[in-house]
Image (cartoon, rainbow, N blue to C red):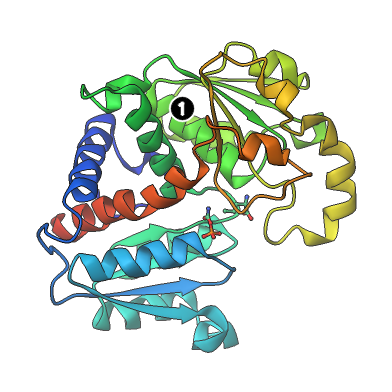
Amino acid sequence: MKHFLKDTDCTAPEIARLFDLAARYKRTRGTHEKPLAGQSWAMIFSKSSTRTRVSFEVGIHELGGNPIFLNRNDIQIGRGESVEDTAKVLSRFVHGLIVRTYEQQEIERLAASGSIPVINALTDFLHPCQIYTDAFTMTERWAKGGDLFASLQGRKIAFLGDTACNMAYSWILGAALFGMKLSLSGPKEFAPGADIDAQLKQDGLPKNYHFTTDPAEAVKDADVVYTDVWVSMGKEEETKERIRVMSPYQVTAKLFALAKPDALFMHCLPAHPGEEVEQAVLDNPRSIIFDQAENRLHVQKAILATLAQSPRA
Ligand code: CP
Ligand code: NVA
């Protein structure tokens, strides 16, 4: 793996190795090796962040490296310096780049122009660090000491609400890679678009998901009920309309009860209780939202270490 720009940048065996490494880093936090010793990694963020920013900054530090946080508006890219020149300049200073931005194309261009690994820390299209972490978090519940990656095989996820957002799209790629079943349910105007089907095709993966406008149908027999905010960053102008059309897809306690009796509730956070999910579901003992948040640290450390050790052309 040279970059981590989309979920499909790793093969299944590579993901299995990442999960094993993340589990080891979690077990041995504070005492494990420091593969980023002597390195600096820059983080260019064009959008707000709590979990991603802090988990990457702490993770780089724990691996022996130095994180440099760059708000887009504080550096020259925010005043029009080209993405290509930015990548070339930063490649002379730092050992890797972590980017949160709007267009997926921007991180693809940064990766193509520089000579250092680039990690996608969320775009409008995908959020692969979150999906890998979520899958890892599921394995903690299901693997019971066995093969982490294999424990995902055949499990069903129901994703409700905005099924055309970065989280839904990353789950479409992720589920295909992890061998999971995926049912998405939301208003038809927010059904997954041709862009994600094209990405599946480009990655040689079959169209593996089912879309329905009936949330009860999606949730039936699910091992995980997953939701995300209805108004993603950058979509604030559409707030009123989104809330209006997505309200039938709120994860209520009643809807959650239609999933398997031991089903987990998951949310990438931040949550908006009373919109996409009821507070009672966030508080349910089978809600593992804070394990997901914590695991961002361990899984991203595994991604960082793997990229830092990958030979570069
Ligand atoms: N889930 C997630 O990416 O959170 P932040 O926006 O706080 O980084
Ligand atoms: N879909 C959300 C995810 C936040 C982590 C957004 O893009 O704002």
Residue behind mark 1 = 175
Query: What x and y, as percent, mark residue 94?
Result: 26, 78
Q: Residue at x 39, y 62 (%)?
A: 55
Position of residue 133 relative to residue 231, above or below, is above
Q: Residue at x 73, y 16 (%)?
A: 216
Find residue 131 and report its image quarter. top left
Q: Residue at x 44, y 33 (%)?
A: 174
237 left or right, relative to 105: right
234 left or right, relative to 245: left
Query: Is residue 312 at all visible to an observer of this figure?
Result: no
Q: At label 1, which amino acid type do we have?
A: Ala
Query: What x and y, as percent, mark residue 95?
Result: 23, 72
Find residue 225 and report its image quarter. top right
Tally of numbered discs: 1
Query: What x and y, as percent, mark residue 14?
Result: 23, 37
Position of residue 133 relative to residue 208, above or below, is below
Query: What x and y, as percent, mark residue 119?
Result: 37, 59
Q: Residue at x 61, y 54 (%)?
A: 270
- Pick the front one: 168 or 29: 29
Query: Is residue 151 at all visible to an observer of this figure?
Result: yes
- Pick the front one: 299 or 30: 30
Position of residue 300 relative to residue 75, above or below, is above
188 left or right, relative to 166: right
